[in-house]
Image (cartoon, rainbow, N blue to C red):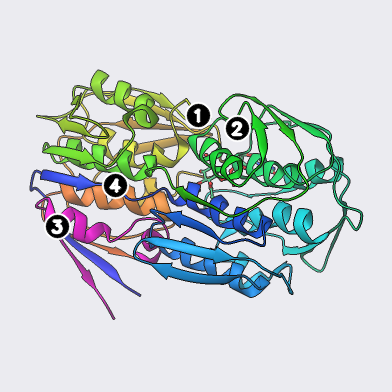
Amino acid sequence: MDKFQITGGTPLQGELPVSGSKNAALPALAACLLTAEPVTLRRIPPVKDIATMQKLLAYTGAQIDQQDGSVRIEARSLDRPEAPYDVVKTMRASSLVLGPLVARTGVARVSMPGGCAIGARPINMHISALELLGAEIEQSHGYVEARAPQGLRGGRVHFDRITVTGTEDVLMAAVLARGETIIGNAAREPEVTDLADLLIAMGAKIEGAGSSTIRVQGVERLHGAEHTIIPDRIEAGTFMLAAAITEGDVVISNCNPEHVSALTVKMQQAGAEVADAGPGALRVRAHGRPTAIDVTTEEYPGFATDLQAQYMAWMTIAQGISFVTETIFENRFMHTQELARMGANIRIVGRQAIVAGEPELTGAQVIASDLRASASLVLAALRARGQSTIDRVYHMDRGYERIEEKLAAAGARITRLTD
Ligand code: EPU
């Protein structure tokens, strides 16, 4: 298993370019199953989760061609409308193929995701929404099997709570359902809007994506399209915090500053300078320790749960005490034990982490438990005095493209150790 070795203490300088969004690319790839015609997706990030999703599409029968950062998918016929356990256990977003497969072929068999390090990850809301569109769903032997031999029909879906991939799954099913579907309490994440843009380019009729009510008029069939994936707002936010925690001066390029507004405000309150640096770019500068500022994770446009761990890494060196409250996932504090090994002073009370800022962190051997937890450990290590080793960086490889190369180009002392 690969490790990162990091020697902390160097302020990052220069530029950190952001890749395409993993969480927008995953549903976009699944959406390619909705048409027999070729779809070309540009700015697909070459990260592990994307490779897994492509493997899954190939398993169902789609033809996949990679060409220089873009991917061409042709799902002419789908002989195996199934997501097997071996794929789903490494990537829970595989449930995103449930909606498209049942809408296109009338049948889908998808392994249940099971839990992971950040929480239970159920898909009950995906299932009940698809049932509302007329799918007959059975759950047995760890699989969800959906059938709609006569096709799906439109309906009124209202999610109990906001679900990002649930909204995407149902949106992909609704575009081929007969009649109108209204999705209430829909996720407003930019990744949902990006998916809707792709579906519209494929001939779907969708209104309201980006708001909490989405209206879809089903169409008979979709056609091929070309689409460019939005920049990864979580990678952008991770880089903003990398600049701040190292007291650096970095331009984060190829990003959408609007998508990181909630983080920008918190960082400015905590004393970092975050300024526009031309189209699609932000300049982040910081000097000295930040002021402790509380955050509570929320659905978009609130503070992203996917940036909670990285923000907390910065708060470990703040002046004062901050409260970091996690409202989206029940178990997303695994990084706190490892941060403590680096000298952080954090107490967990239920869904709240109380972080008492310390003047410095010290390098240590730590273990990454999930994707964003590993990013928080990398940030802490970039700041810490001395050397750190971060084990299980395969978690990081699931969602960040060549992170060590990007950080090294901005002056970080980071190397990958391969067994
Ligand atoms: N939930 C249910 N039932 C469902 C679906 C969700 O109870 O049927 C609960 C979840 O357990 C959670 C909450 O609802 O407590 C919200 O979960 P959501 O469905 O929105 O999460 P997701 O769609 O599975 C996506 C991202 C996550 C990100 C969350 C929240 C993708 C592929 N994944 O997950 O990204 O944290 O939204 O914004 O888009 C990551 O990239 O590291 C990551 C975990």
Q: Quadrant of residue 288?
A: top left
Amino acid on which the number 1 mark rests in the picture: Tyr
Q: Quadrant of residue 214?
A: top right
Mark 3: few, some, or many residues within 10 Å (few <14, many ≥20)?
some
According to the picture, the residue beneath numbered tag 3 turns out to be: 408
Vertical position of residue 330 compared to residue 412: above or below: above
> Are the two marked residues, 3 and 1, in contact with CB atoms closer than 8 angstroms?
no
Vertical position of residue 59 compared to residue 32: above or below: below
Mark toward the viewer: 2 or 3: 2
According to the picture, the residue beneath numbered tag 1 turns out to be: 300
The magenta stretch is 392-419
According to the picture, the residue beneath numbered tag 4 turns out to be: 18
Quadrant containing ligand 1 reads top right
Cβ(mark 2) to ligand 1 < 8 Å?
Answer: yes
Residue 187 marker: 2
Q: Nearer the viewer, residue 118 or 357?
A: 118
Mark 4: few, some, or many residues within 10 Å (few <14, many ≥20)?
many
Query: Image point 14% across, 57% down: which residue?
Result: 408
Mark toward the viewer: 3 or 4: 4
Q: Give the Cα distance between marks 2 and 3.
A: 36 Å
